[in-house]
Image: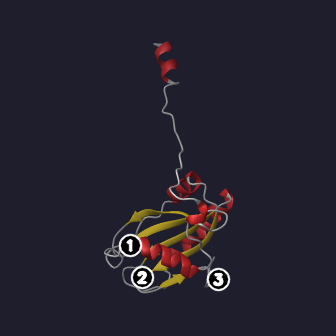
Amino acid sequence: MKAQIQSSLFMVSEIKVSYQPKFRASERPKVIRSKDAYNILYNNLDHSRIEISEQFYILLLNRDNNVIGISEISSGGFSATVVDPKLIFGIALKSAAAGIILAHNHPSSNLQPSNQDLIVTKKLVEAGKLLDLQILDHLILSKYNYFSFGDEGLI
């Protein structure tokens, strides 16, 4: 019995981390200002959902602010979605991102950040500092425009 318990302690699953980019860094779009990030995000999102349900995305960037990729973090209801920092930073670390731009839509098209938006952003900025992963901006998207936390001095 003791040998069986002891051998089961060493039976664990192997975890592999893999990142396989499809494009060279020189071919990726570059984010210089918030409008660049908005255009990249907007052109890669499902427009049929932007006024129906709230979604949260991250735009992952390398050290030169070239886009590594976009990842949907969550999709929720009309007024909220779950933002899990472990998921955000897990994806960012696996993709070797140097910076992250947070983004979510407001189906109501009201671009003003809610108190919860401000709290979540502050929490993620602080967590990013611990991991040396800079949160460069947080965009609130609508079908026709956007709000940038960075442009407004909120990051």
The kind of residue tagged 1 is Glu
| Mark 1 residue crowding within 10 angstroms, few (<14) / some (14–19) / many (20+) | many
Above or below: residue 99 compared with residue 12: below
* Discs 1/2, front: 2
Disc 1 versus disc 2: distance between alpha carbons? 10 Å
Question: Which of the 4 quarters of the picture holds residue 26?
Answer: bottom right
Q: Secondary structure at mark 2?
A: loop
Task: Give 131 or 92, whichever is nearer the viewer.
Answer: 92
Which percent across, then down, holds residue 104? Answer: 46, 73
Provide residue 146's location: percent of width, then percent of height.
49, 83
Q: Which residue is mark 3?
A: 153
Q: Measured from the top left, where is residue 78 in percent x and y? A: 34, 75
Residue drawn 56% across the image and 51% down it: 94
- Residue 34 placement: quadrant: bottom right
Identify the residue position indicated by label 2 in the image.
Answer: 142
**Residue drawn at x 36%, y 76% as measured from the top left:** 50
Residue 85, placed above or below residue 10: below
Q: CA distance from mark 1 to mark 3?
A: 24 Å
Of the two numbered discs 3 and 2 on the same chain, state the one appearing first in sequence.
2
Number of the label disc, if any, that sits on residue 54: 1
The three-letter amino acid code for the residue at tag 3 is Gly
Residue type, mark 2 in image? Ser
